[in-house]
Image: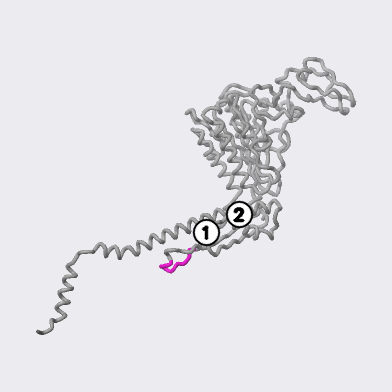
Amino acid sequence: MPLASPFGWLRRTAKAFHAADDGNIAVLFGIAVIPLISFVGVAVDYSRATAARSAMQGAADSATLMVSKDYAAGVIRASDIQATAEKYFKALYTSPGINNVTVTATYTARSANGSSTVVMNTSGSMPTSFLKVAGFTALPFTASSTSTWGATRLRVAMALDVTGSMDWDDKLTAMKTAAIKLVNTLKATASTDADVYISIIPFNVMVNVGTANKDAEWLDWDTDYGSCKSNRTTQNSCQAAGETWSWWANSCTSRYTRKSTCVAGGETWIPSGVSNWKGCVTDRTTSNDYDVIKTPPTTATPATLFLAKSYSACPLSLLPMKAAYSSNESDTSTAESTLKGKINKLDAEGNTNQPIGLFWAWMSLQTGVPLNTPAKDTEYKYTDAIILLSDGDNTQSGNSNSVSAIDARQKKLCDNIKDPLNGTTTIFTIQVNTDGDDESAVLKYCASDGQFFQSTTADQIEIAFQSIGSSLTKLRLAQ
């Protein structure tokens, strides 16, 4: 029997294969699974590289700031910057499995605009797991960070409402927490003691300048303590050392602890203190608008003096401008002499007088009496800022109990603060409105462009402070 032709068999087999549809899905999946696995692998490798790069950026930012602080404080020299940068970065960057890590730090000395910079450039590469198939054995990435200091220094005055209503709805606690976080934020941007100064001005109807100032010549005692000063002997100054003072009114001795003898010839009589004075002062006289302008107090013009006042709800004493960062001071939250300690001890009592808080915040930005703020270094640029937080309408002042009158005076004060002739000061205002009150027209009026914040819950106080902190921080660091 002849052999069957192989071509017939091949034709029949080909037709059968063409007509068969069993196992199509498995075949297609087998073909498609290769690119699917490749795409997943790319995503995994890329995600790992992104995470490693983010960690590198964070380490670079921190290391750059630490290096700049060390150099500005005199801890290291310019020749030490590269080695110090490497040390800090390697201690901070702990991502495993990263190869070829390099760190380059470049220092630029103070330029014509008064700024100094440290620029850190870092790079590394991450071995791939899946992309090796495509010929990519590693994914390289870089990070860069710049710390700038000296170009702009900050002076920030916080006028904080401590009236009785701040005790409601957890507002006082939230304000204290937010204010302390702002101190931490600004402190972190400082490389030297003089970079950032902050003052704390608690206010209700009055402001407390501290009983340590009881002998200050810029205080006027006549208004609240009767005519004791005018009832002293008609002799305005002693004529010779050792001369004893005398009084027309014996009642004065119960209010003043008088100086018994003259120290030197020609010394002008000054009260040395009032036993029941807690430190409060009220608004200056409205004549000549002295309570809305920054005219310094002088005995030659009695209307410019600050009126000492007896007030049972006297708030915590203010804290004049203090360095947010100090190389010689421990970070404490208890001592009233520190920023955080002062904030932590705030309590709530009394009625609302926003202008006096705003006014003393402005005073804390001025050199000389009454608060003797440190002078500004002419080689640096400065940004002055006031943060005014309040939770209610103006209700009482030393000059008026009329809301409209107090608001009108506050607007004049804000106009004067923002007047370029008085320097450049940015005003941030925060209305804490947990009662559904109307938007505060006077707080919105006082705010610099776009710097009015309304908080309808206690939690939103922190959001407002974070926004303000972000705005101020941009003036200290460029990243």
The tag earlier along the polypeptide, 1 or 2, is 2
Q: Which residues are magenta?
A: 132-139
Residue found at x 78% / y 19%:
230
Instruction: Give the image quarter of residue 13.
Output: bottom left
Q: Residue furthest bottom?
A: 2
Q: State left or right for residue 3 relative to residue 131.
A: left
Q: Nearer the viewer, residue 240 or 214?
A: 214
Is 133 part of what is drawn in magenta?
Answer: yes
Q: Position of residue 370 (x, y in %)?
A: 72, 33
Residue 354 versus residue 56 in the image, above or below:
above
Q: Nearer the viewer, residue 434 or 2?
A: 2
Q: State left or right for residue 73 relative to residue 104.
A: right
Q: Position of residue 423 (x, y in %)?
A: 65, 40
Q: Position of residue 36 (x, y in %)?
A: 35, 61
Q: State left or right for residue 165 relative to residue 151.
A: left
Q: Is residue 185 visible?
A: yes
Residue 62 versus residue 355 in the image, above or below:
below
Which quadrant, please, contains the N terminus? bottom left
Report the residue marked by disc 2. 63
Which amino acid lies under the numbered mark 2 shown in the image of this protein?
A: Ala
Q: Is residue 361 visible?
A: no
Instruction: Give the image quarter of residue 26.
Output: bottom left
Residue found at x 41% / y 68%:
134
Q: Nearer the viewer, residue 322 or 99?
A: 99
Q: Position of residue 96 (x, y in %)?
A: 52, 59
Is disc 1 placed on a helix, strand or loop? loop
The numbered dot on residue 134 is none
Report the residue marked by disc 1. 96
Is disc 2 placed on a helix, strand or loop? helix
